[in-house]
């Protein structure tokens, strides 16, 4: 079954400073939508607003139903923030059980974890910690997945594997991915937007980014 999420009418202010204005995006099952933007332009604010952990004027409609606090409905949306969110005292076994994700399948992609099922997250390196969080969010049972700069601290080989996993999951999910590197977004996404001067701009190619002053 195909699902649709429409984001519109988004307007976010901090004190009197306008951060986001008149944002519109449409994401469907099968889409991997990339959101480019310089650091500090509001990409994380946009994701948190969609997820419902940052209050603002907005309309988020999933399958014709308005959703304001999406974080309360993990079957609809899951969100990977830029910071670590899984407590360090939990074991990998507990994490995968809580997210209802198959640990053995994970080790097929990343064999280094095969003997670490009872290892606590806090004993992993920062990159390994990030990889676990990224994987369980991507594989979790949700209609839409929001990934905020997911490839930070991930090796190039692991990025290729994650991109292939996202491609598999597209059959039943829609993805929104932020990054500040065009090449990485271009490789991963079938639609690309640029967040610039508080507004969303649809981008077809590098020439569009040059015209908007994002690439030189």
Image: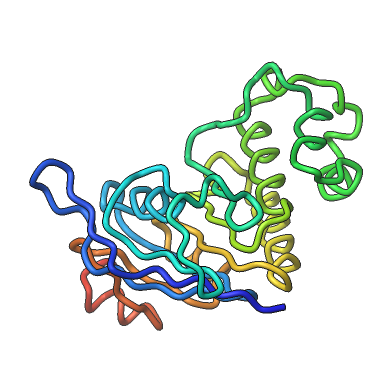
**Relative horizontal placement of residue 14, taking residue 84 as reference (left or right):** left
Q: Is residue 216 visible?
A: no
Q: Nearer the viewer, residue 186 or 149?
A: 149
Q: Residue at x 76, y 35 (%)?
A: 98
Tell me the quadrant of the picture where the N terminus can be found: bottom right
Tell me the quadrant of the picture where the C terminus can be found: bottom left
Image location of residue 43, percent across then percent down: 35, 54
Q: Check the image and report above or below for 39 versus 29.
A: above
Q: Residue at x 49, y 65 (%)?
A: 185
Q: Check the image and report above or below for 141 versus 96.
A: below
Q: Check the image and report above or below for 174 versus 153.
A: below
Which residue extends farthest front? 65
Image location of residue 85, percent across then percent down: 56, 31
Q: Nearer the viewer, residue 56 or 179?
A: 56
Q: How is the image coloured?
A: rainbow
**Relative horizontal placement of residue 155, taking residue 101 as reference (left or right):** left
Q: Image quarter for residue 54?
A: top left
Image location of residue 55, percent across then percent down: 32, 46
Q: Image quarter for residue 143?
A: bottom right
Q: Residue at x 72, y 63 (%)?
A: 164
Image location of residue 168, percent across then percent down: 75, 67
**Relative horizontal placement of residue 86, taking residue 69 as reference (left or right):** right
Q: Is residue 117 visible?
A: yes
**Relative horizontal placement of residue 62, taking residue 156 as reference (left or right):** left
Q: Check the image and report above or below for 186 versus 184.
A: below
Q: How many marks?
A: 0
């Amino acid at each position: 079954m195909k699902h649709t999420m429409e984001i519109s009418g988004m307007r976010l202010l901090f004190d009197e400073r306008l951060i986001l204005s008149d944002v519109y995006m449409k994401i469907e099952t099968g889409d991997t939508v990339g959101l480019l933007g310089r650091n500090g332009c509001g990409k994380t604010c946009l994701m948190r607003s969609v997820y419902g952990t940052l209050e603002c004027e907005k309309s988020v409609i999933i399958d014709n139903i308005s959703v304001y606090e999406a974080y309360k409905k993990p079957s609809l949306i899951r969100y990977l923030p830029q910071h670590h969110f899984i407590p360090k005292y939990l074991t990998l076994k507990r994490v995968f059980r809580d997210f209802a994700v198959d640990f053995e399948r994970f080790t097929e992609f990343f064999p280094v974890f095969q003997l670490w099922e009872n290892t606590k997250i806090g004993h992993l390196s920062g990159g390994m910690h990030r990889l676990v969080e990224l994987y369980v969010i991507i594989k979790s049972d949700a209609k839409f997945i929001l990934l905020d700069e997911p490839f930070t601290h991930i090796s190039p080989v692991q990025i290729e594997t994650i991109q292939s996993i996202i491609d598999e999951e597209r059959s039943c999910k829609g993805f929104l991915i932020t990054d500040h590197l065009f090449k990485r977004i271009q490789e991963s996404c079938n639609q690309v937007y640029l967040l610039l001067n508080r507004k969303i701009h649809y981008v077809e190619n590098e020439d569009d980014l040059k015209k908007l002053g994002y690439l030189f």
